[in-house]
Amino acid sequence: MKDYVNWAILAPGRIANSMAAAMNGIKAEGKKINLYAVASRNQQRAKDFAAQWNFQKAYGSYEELFSDPDVDAIYVANPHAFHHESVIAALNAGKHVLCEKPAGCSRNQLDDMIKLAKEKDLFFMEAMWTAFNPCIAEIRREIAAGTIGQIKNIDSFFNNRNPYDPNDRNYAPELAGGALLDLGIYNIYFAMMIADFSPLVDHSSTVRMLKGVDAWNSVNLTFENGIITSFQSAMDLPHPEKSHPAVIYGSKGYITVENFFMAQKAQVYTYKNIWGGESELVKEIDQPFAVNGYEYELAHATECILSGKKESNIHSFKKSQDLCDTMDMLRKDWGMKYPWEK
């Protein structure tokens, strides 16, 4: 039995470059990863990517990648509107799959993937890098230690300004565009982690639609354990703080998080008086990435595959399903359906 995984990347775009950098970085640390193949719909693009990132083979079609018997696992990196098709094809070809978030554009799509992975006895995981973030793990330890008391609220903002462009996939309903699946998914999962994956019991939201997709949304979610999260995600409006901030409020203090979706720094404060008007910085959390943040989910998936696990114990099928259910629920509220759902 091999003691390494022959990894392949499907669709060498922006996200794929980040994953390739992580693959190279942790391979250099002696991890059990072999950069084996890359596949694009364009042969030259595949060759250029393979040469840049030290992959052994470059394919000009996805079908060639699927048919290569030496490919063990595939990182699916194309836009999420194509994840269902690509993951199903990879699983049917007998390959383990790590699929960029969101794995499915709906619960139905996600369940198709999970069902087939189980039938084929293959590892499958949504690549939710936030689940493996060391800084967030340290934040959760501070919360568990009671430093800021009982958690009450979680606020977060993931607002970018990308002016409307009819050729941008983010504004295309047929490509599952919109802020929710691209950005808001991180707000939701971050809150799920801080709320210890308590079930949802209530929600409210408002949305501003543009050309059939959510350009901006504001959402409140209430978890069964009483924690409430309020968040915004937007494609066409920036936030005054460029760091995509989040604040976790407790009964004794609060935690501020910079770039919560890819957190590397956080500050822990406790209240100095009963009114909360003054606070004291009691801890600074500084957890820089070993490479770029993608390495943690990659290392986890590799270890799962080598140990014969078919499902992650960290980002499980149920967590992916709960996340997808929440996004489906919000889209239903907004009357936002993708063309193939009508």
Image (spheres, rainbow, N blue to C red):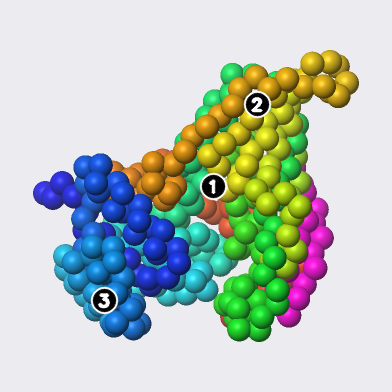
- At x 66%, y 80%, the residue is 165
With 241 as the anchor, is 114 left or right in this view?
left
Residue 221 in the image, given as x and y percentages of width and height? 74, 47
Residue 125 position (above or below residue 30)? below
Q: In this figure, which residue is indicated by the disc labeled 2?
A: 268
Alpha carbon distance from label 2 to label 1: 17 Å
Residue 139 in the image, given as x and y percentages of width and height? 57, 31
Amino acid under disc 1: Met
Q: Nearer the viewer, residue 111 or 277?
A: 277
The answer to which of marks 2 and 3 sits earlier in the sequence is: 3
Q: Residue furthest right?
A: 275
Amino acid under disc 2: Val
| Residue 229 occupies quadrant | top right
The residue carrying pointer 2 sits among few (fewer than 14), some (14 to 19) or many (20 or more) residues within 10 Å by Cα, namely: many
With 124 as the anchor, is 230 left or right in this view?
right
The C terminus appears in which quarter of the rendering? Answer: bottom right
Q: In this figure, which residue is indicated by the disc labeled 3?
A: 47
- At x 42%, y 75%, the residue is 85
Q: In this figure, which residue is indicated by the disc labeled 1?
A: 262
The answer to which of marks 3 and 1 sits earlier in the sequence is: 3
- At x 66%, y 84%, the residue is 166
Alpha carbon distance from label 3 to label 1: 30 Å
| Residue 192 occupies quadrant | top right
The answer to which of marks 2 and 1 sits earlier in the sequence is: 1
Magenta residues, dominant SS class: strand
Q: Which residues are magenta?
A: 201-223
